Amino acid sequence: MEEIVLVSDNHGQRKPLEYLKENYPVTDYFIHCGDSEMHPNQLSGFTSVQGNNDFFHAYPNERIITIANHNILVVHGHMHMIFNQPQQLARYAKKVHCDIVFYGHTHIPQDITVNGVRCINPGSIWHNRDGSKPSYMIIHLDDKNIEVEKKEYKF
């Protein structure tokens, strides 16, 4: 199984990302769903996309990566959602032949399947808007299984 550390919306806070790198030194992938508000050099080791608050650095708006025979769309989400609901995002993922979407933006952790597309949002590792603790996710992935574990980050 491949292991992915999935994070989003740290909004310039460096310590949470340093924590992840220190505590998951042998993970296969670090993926950031945008709004890091950090220079790409500060995201060394992370695959990242552009968030709506990433004004000063050039990240791609989306990435498609393949892990364990899954095509994964990585976006921030602000350009693909209506009322913070992932239905439109899932339709777009299908259009670009992806079966999983990693996204952020809402600051609310979520793991749901919409029209056959697994939509996974780690929430914000800085501040969640639903009253839950700051969070990230650990994902274990193989050809047949997707295991998602929400983790709390304590400052």
Image (tube, helix red, strand yellow):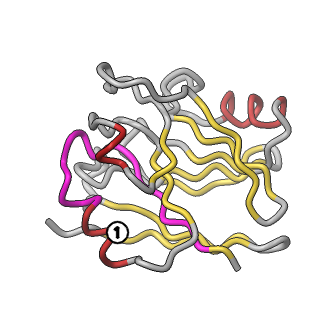
**Looking at this rendering, what residue extends furthest in the left direction?**
155
The part of the image, by quadrant, that contains residue 136 is bottom left
Query: Is 17 situated left or right of 103 in this image?
Result: left
**To which residue does mark 1 refer?**
21
Give coordinates of residue 137: x percent, y percent. 46, 65
The part of the image, by quadrant, that contains residue 114 is top right
Q: Is residue 53 above or below residue 111?
A: above
Task: Identify which residue is drawn at 55% across, 26% down.
Answer: 61
The part of the image, by quadrant, that contains residue 93 is top right
Give coordinates of residue 35: x percent, y percent. 35, 35
Q: Quadrant of the C terminus?
A: bottom left
Q: Which residues are magenta?
A: 3-17
Query: Is 106 situated left or right of 39 in this image?
Result: right
Task: Identify which residue is drawn at 49% across, 60% down.
Answer: 30
Q: Is residue 46 above or below residue 29?
A: above
Q: Residue flagged by tag 1: what amino acid is it?
A: Lys
